[in-house]
Amino acid sequence: MKWRKSGRIFTAEDGPAWMASHAQIPTVLDLGDKLRAYVAYRPRPGFSLTTFLDLDREDPSKVLHVHEGPILDPGPPGSFDAHGIMPQAVTIHDEQVWLYYSGWSRRVDIPYSNWTGLAVSDDDGTTFRKMFPGPIVDRTPTEIYSATGCCVLRTPSRWHMWYASGVDWHEIDGRQEELYTIKHASSSDGVCWARDDRVLLPDLRTPEPKHRPAVVQLGDTYHMWFCYRGIEGFRDGSNSYRIGYASSSDLDTWNRDDAAAGLDVSADGWDSSMVAYPCVVDTPKATFMFYSGNGFGAEGFGYAVLDR
C-alpha cells in the first residue's frame, strides 16, 4: 500500500470563531455528489464539539461549504457526553444518516471517561438528534475504562464495529495516561452490540495505545488502518501517533504489518510530528485517507490518495 499525500484541507482558524482550535478525528461520508466531513473542534481547552464541512468528491482539497454551528449539544451535567462530542463513524441506514460519536465526561481521578453514543439525521446529515440520552456502547463488567474511537462496517449478514477499548491507566510524570487497544463488536441492528472482548492486534512496544481503526474492503481483502503511539512523550514527541496497518480475509484474524501502512509523518509542516485518526473512504474514482496532523489536529486535517 502507498498513499500519496495531497495536503492540508482545513484548520480551526479557517472556520467560525467558535471553533477556536483543533480539527480532530475527520469522519467522512460519501453523499454521492460530495463528501461530508464531520470534524471535532475545541471551543475551549478540554471541551469538544462537532460540525461538518462539505468537500469536492473528486478533489477533497476544495472546501464547498462550512457549517456554521455545532450539530449536537453536549449532554446535561452528569451525562456521558457532558464535556464534549467527537465524531467516530458515519453511515447511511434506512435513508437516515447515523453518526456514532464519542462522548466525553471529566473525572477527578483520571482526566476523562469516553463512551460511544449514536445520533441520527433525516436531512442527509445536516441536523442530528441523539437516538438515546446515554451511550449505546457503555461500561460492562469487564470493560471498565472506555470504548470509543470506532469504525462501523456493514456486511450482508452483520454490522461490525472495531473500536478502542480502554484497558488501563498509567501515571506518567504525575498525570494519568490511558492505555487502549483495538477490539471488535457485532450487531444485527447497529444499536445493540455484542463485544468479543478480544485483543485483535499485537503490540510493537509495551505499552502501546492503539486508536481509531478504519476498515474497508478492497477486492477480496479487508484492510485496517489505525493509529498507535507510546505511553510517554507522545504529544508531538518521538512517540506521537503514527499510522499502522493490518489485513484480514475473514474479519476475524488480522495480520499486523505497519511497513505496509503507506503513510508516515512529513519532513516538515503540519503533519511532520504526528499523523493520527485515519478515516478511509473508497469512491468510484479514488480511495482517500483523511487524518489529523500535529498536536492531535491542532494544525488541522488533510488527506492522502491511495496509489492503486
Image (spheres, rainbow, N blue to C red):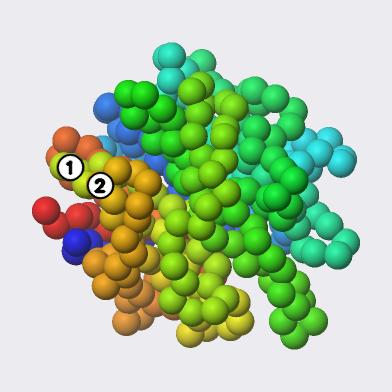
Q: Which mark is residue 130?
A: none
- What residue is drawn where x is 61% and y is 81%? 232
Whether residue 107 sits left or right of residue 5 in the image: it is: right
Residue 81 lies, with reference to residue 93, above or below; the image says: below
Answer yes or no: is residue 30 visible.
yes
Give the x, y percent position of residue 40: 57, 49
Residue under label 1, please give it.
Answer: 220
Residue type marked 2: Ser
- What residue is drawn where x is 34% and y is 29%? 155
Whether residue 1 sits left or right of residue 204 in the image: it is: left
Crowd class of label 1 (few under 14; some 14 to 19; many from 20; radius 10 Å): few
Residue type marked 1: Asp
Crowd class of label 2 (few under 14; some 14 to 19; many from 20; radius 10 Å): few
> CB under 8 Å between callouts 1 and 2?
yes
Residue 277 lies, with reference to residue 83, above or below; the image says: below
Foreground: 137 or 111? 137
Give the x, y percent position of residue 293: 44, 66
Foreground: 267 or 114? 114
Residue under label 2, please give it.
Answer: 249
- N-terminal of the pair, mark 1 or mark 2, is 1
Give the x, y percent position of residue 175: 76, 76
Give the Cα distance between marks 1 and 2. Answer: 7 Å
- What residue is drawn where x is 20% and y is 55%? 306
Foreground: 59 or 94? 94
Q: Quadrant of residue 245?
A: bottom left
Answer yes or no: is residue 126 visible.
no
Element type where label 1 sits in the image: loop
Element type where label 2 sits in the image: loop
